[in-house]
Amino acid sequence: MSEKNRDGKRTARERLAAEREKQKSAERRRRTLIVGASVVCVLGLAAVIGVVAANSGKDDSSDKAGPVVAPSGAEGEDALAIPVGKDGARSTLTVWEDFRCPACKAFETAYRPTVHELAESGKLKVEYHLATLIDGNMGGSGSRNAANAAACAQDVGKFPAYHDVLYENQPEETKDEYAENSRLIELAGKVDGLDTPAFRTCVEQGTHNSWVAKSNQAFQNGRFGGTPTVLFNGKNIYQDRSMTPEKLKKMVEEAHQG
């Protein structure tokens, strides 16, 4: 074989190897994007956390922060928790969530019937804390606007129903549909008695935006791994891979019996 032919074959092999490596790199990037955008809602490295902090509470129409107005009935430190259930319950479920977060929707879908049953029976109190993680990670204001709308619903005692409607109609994580107040008001029509002039004004003026920003800051200060973060009587149970709705119900029943 001539030296020229050997050089030609060597060059072809090198080009083929380079192309294969290029394809492998593209596949690795594709898998990373799928995991990052679709599977879990997690905090990234310090740079991403900085973006979350910088974007929290921002409004597309105005960068000016208004007064911190907590929704009616909010409880806990700085009135950042929206309570559902009875105060006399022996068990408390603390949920940190983001209405744009698909993992939060997955948790809601799996646990909602059990949580509703336990809360309505007086055995479990749920404290919802709202975060804007996805706005910070992916841009937009849907997390913030949806949280504000949910707080507006709390003002008139409609938070639980509207909370569920927001998850039932959650857009794809990459589509910031909840940034549109018109969409949030449209969904309020699915809750009896919620779509009122007062609710619309609250949503359109972003009455609770600064409260949402303060809630999100508390989420960051807590150094939680991501949303949802679910605590049962102070213990993080969402990280427990053996946790199921049935196991949660058993834990609540045992605590209720003392």
Image: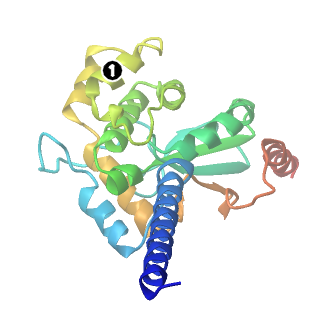
Q: Is residue 214 left or right of residue 96?
A: left
Percent from the top left, x then y, of residue 176?
33, 37
Helix, strand, or loop for circle 1?
A: helix
Point 59% across, 52% down: residue:
94
Percent from the top left, x then y, of residue 238?
67, 56
Point 74% across, 35% down: residue:
114
Q: Is residue 231 left or right of residue 189?
A: right
Given residues 28 and 46, the one toward you in this image is 28
Percent from the top left, x then y, of residue 131?
42, 51
Percent from the top left, x then y, of residue 61?
12, 39
Point 26% across, 56% down: residue:
55
Label 1 belongs to which residue? Answer: 185
Q: Is residue 183 visible?
A: yes
Q: Is residue 87 visible?
A: no
Q: Amino acid at mark 1?
A: Ile
Most extreme residue toward the bottom, as rendered? Answer: 3
- Give the vertical position of 109 relative to 190 (above or below): below
Given residues 225 and 122, the one toward you in this image is 225
Q: Answer with the quarter of the image where residue 205 lies.
A: top left
Scheme of image coloration:
rainbow
- Category of crowding for the residue at label 1, using alpha-carbon neighbours closer than 10 angstroms: few (below 14), some (14–19), many (at least 20): some
Q: Is residue 43 left or right of residue 240?
A: left
